[in-house]
Image: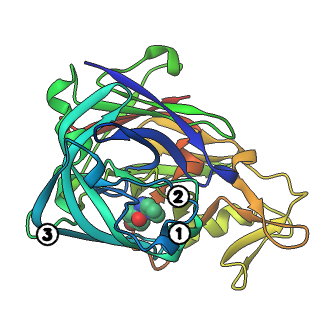
Amino acid sequence: AQGSVTASPSQYDGEYDCPVTVGTPGVTLPLDFDTGSSDLWVFSSELPASERSGHAYYTSSSSSTSKLDSGETWDISYGDGSGAEGNIYIDKVTIGGITVTSQAVEAAESVSSEFVSDTSNDGLVGFAFDSINTASPNHVQTWFGNAEAQLASPVFTANLKKGKAGNYNFGYIDSSEYTGSITYATINSANGFWEFSASGYAVGSGAFSSQSIDVIADTGTTLIYLPAAIVKAYYAKVSGSSNSASAGGYIFPCSATLPSLTIGIGSYKAVVPGTFLNYAPNTGSTCFGGLQSNAGIGLSILGDVFLKSQFVVFNQGVPKIGFAPG
Ligand SMILES: O=C(NNC1=NCCC1)c1ccc(Br)cc1
């Protein structure tokens, strides 16, 4: 089998949401696909009505195929401080025409304010490794982990776009979605992430600095987070930029012309256009950067600002990750 699903950007490309059908009869919910976590959870009838406001949700008792996963709970906290928790049902989940008949569906009983106010999604689908799934006392498998048995190849691809719909594909690599060749990096999945070593960086037309940068590819994180020294070198080329405590990061005049950012993956030079690095308006005539410091995170993150400039292959069989110009 093979599948494909549309990925729709929220405002400012903050996240990319995809239709997922759960239960019988199916309820279709826009879920945030997140390669930085490994829980599939949904807004549910078990939430207080105040926390469901503005959201569609899953009602397990209305699904003839749902079965309580007795004794199992989940409780997740994300890097941005948001979180959710609840209990678990086993039910049918279909994405892009691929149906997993016994998927652990984590039903939310409580969600943080960030999720209540983010009405772009009604939950998340985690595409990282099972080791960081939060279900307790037993891990449950990701949807992709369960779907792999149906796929010709243990791969999914991300073809995210700036300001318009892209897509995720499952089980195959569509050569019409990229140019040139795909360059792969070995994945170290010990931390449960799509983690690998980038080979260096360049700012605009400047010299490429060869250095190993430990990064994760995370579709659930909006921006790019790199070591402070690299970020400082980037904004040194942006007139009027500053690292603003009140804004929570680097800002600059919205009239600035931003240099591109190149990230090395092996010998491949992945270029993020300067226009992608003006993330969104801040206050007044200042704008907030799509590149920020990883200080306090402990790892560097290639989030959507980077990923939407590339065609990305996530191969869970090896595991390895591949990049090509989108
Ligand atoms: O939470 C993380 N990614 N996903 C999501 N963020 C917000 C909603 C979903 C995340 C993962 C690894 C590191 Br290191 C930092 C952050």
Quadrant in the picture for residue 144: top left
Q: Of label 2 and label 1, which has the lower sequence position?
A: 2
Check disc 3 and report its element: helix, strand or loop: loop
Residue 189 appears at what percent x and percent y? 22, 53
* Vertical arrangement, residue 146 with respect to residue 41, above or below: above
Left or right of 201, for residue 124:
left
| Residue 151 shown left or right of residue 181 in the figure | left
Q: Which amino acid does label 2 sit on?
A: His
How far apart marks 2 and 1 lie (CA) works out to: 8 Å
- In front of the other: 110 or 249: 110
The answer to whether the residue labelled 2 contacts the one labelled 1, judged by CB atoms less than 8 Å apart, is yes
Q: Which of marks 2 and 3 is in front?
A: 2
- Between the residue at mark 2 and the residue at mark 3, the CA separation in whole angstroms equals 26 Å
| Helix, strand or loop under label 1 | helix
Above or below, 253 against 325 in this view is below
The disc label shown at residue 55, or none: 2
Q: Residue 130: where, in percent of width, then height?
A: 19, 54
Q: What element carries label 2?
A: loop
Q: Work out which quarter of the rendered image holds the N terminus and state it.
A: top left
Name the residue nearer the viewer: 89 or 13.
89
Determine which of the numbered discs, if any, sits on residue 136 in the image. 3
Q: Earlier in the sequence, mark 2 or mark 3?
A: 2
